[in-house]
Image: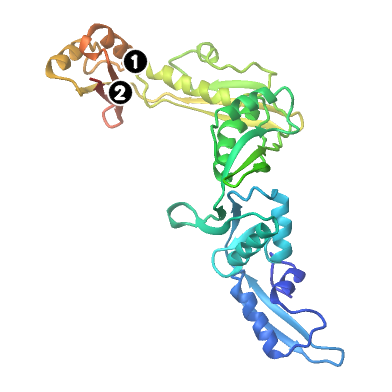
Amino acid sequence: MTGSERFNSQDIAAASGLEIGQTAHEDDFQQASRRLGDTGAFREVAFNFKYAAEGTKVEFQVKDAEKFVPARFENLVWFSTQELQDQLHAAVSLFHGELPLSGALADQVSEALQTMLIQKNVQGSVDYTRAGPDNAVDAIVYTVSGAHIGLRNIEFPGADPALLPKLQAAADKMHIREYSQTVLTEQAHQYLLPVYLAHGYLKAEMGDPEPKVVETTEEHVIVDVSFDAKPGPQYKLSGLEIVGNKIFSTQTLRQLIHAPINDPANVVQLKYDLETMENLYGTKGYMAAKVTSEHQMDEGQHTMACRITIVEGDVYKMGELDFHGVDSETRSRLENLWTIRKGETYDSSYPAQFEEKAYRQIGALKNATADTHESPNPQDQTVDVTIRFDVKQ
């Protein structure tokens, strides 16, 4: 077997259907060639053979398909990740976790999964879809229909005891009642990974959710799920530099950064602090101010130095003001309450203050909710403000 960069000779030989010692002729080799081509794993398959006294030697020359995507197992909770990989590879020799976009290999994996469920006495039918955004397939997703799989607990075996309460508190926010590997993986990155990032584990990775069946009835399967994170080294903040600021002093801006030197580098808090900085600039009319950070890592010392760069931009003025959802009398009263006049420097903190004042002074808004939309106009450096009131009867 030659030409493949993805598969070894043993895997290709097994997929061909030929066995050492069998009686074989050219027709058998042609069928084996078609069998390999039908998998979709190869864009080209050719062979040559030689007859000899000790037996016939055949050599296949292949070229791998151009694109493979991961196989994802949405709710096959009866098997660990490793069990799925091992048993599927044993049944489908060309399966190593990824599949070609076309061909029979995806069907072969589906059939193997169905057999594995039968061996476990699990009632359910295996199906798969090609998933991805905008018709661009980025995964082949296998699911089992016919079983309602509920989630009981999320656990963190091997986690640092100091982080365990925070991980469990984060898991409580996930509110997942039915098992879905996709949803669990997405929410683990949203809720669980930030726990590590907030404590200086800047290269932390969340493992796949590992389900364990704890209860089975005719209608339900109940599972516990564990996450085995790889936190990596803990980094400490070694330095903090702020550049580009003119309107606010470095001391003023530094007070907004909750990052003590030599403490674990909390990049989650840093993100919020940078947003607070931008909001501060907005109070002085700098609506286009951008605050970014660069992180320099010292892998030997496990430290991180942070450089914050500020591009202040131009001062924006008050533009048009509009109110929706209120009658003409209330609109007139609201316009009189708004104190930033057209052409004056805009203050991004003012709309929230204005809403509080409007609720206090205008009885018609007692049960109303407000939705404020700011529209900065870069062409003339103005901000148009629209406030829509939803008055509940």
Q: Is residue 55 above or below residue 83?
A: below
Q: CA distance from mark 2 to mark 1?
A: 9 Å
Instruction: Return the mark for residue 372.
Output: 2
Residue 11 screen position, x and y as percent: 73, 69
Residue 323 screen position, x and y as percent: 21, 22
Q: Residue at x 49, y 53 (%)?
A: 132
The secondary element bearing badge 2 is classed as strand
Q: Is residue 369 above or below residue 105?
A: above
Q: Residue at x 30, y 14 (%)?
A: 355
Kindly identify the amino acid type of the residue bearing the numbered disc 2. Answer: Thr
Instruction: Give the camera-side residue of 340 and 386.
Output: 386
Picture quadrant where residue 298 is located: top right
Q: Residue at x 20, y 24 (%)?
A: 325
Q: Is residue 301 above or below residue 107?
A: above
Q: Identify the mark nearer the N-term, 2 or 1.
A: 1
Instruction: Return the mark for residue 198.
Output: none
The residue carrying mark 1 is 352
Count of marks overlaid on the render: 2
Kindly identify the amino acid type of the residue bearing the numbered disc 1. Answer: Ala
Q: Are dots 2 and 1 in contact, CB under 8 Å?
A: yes
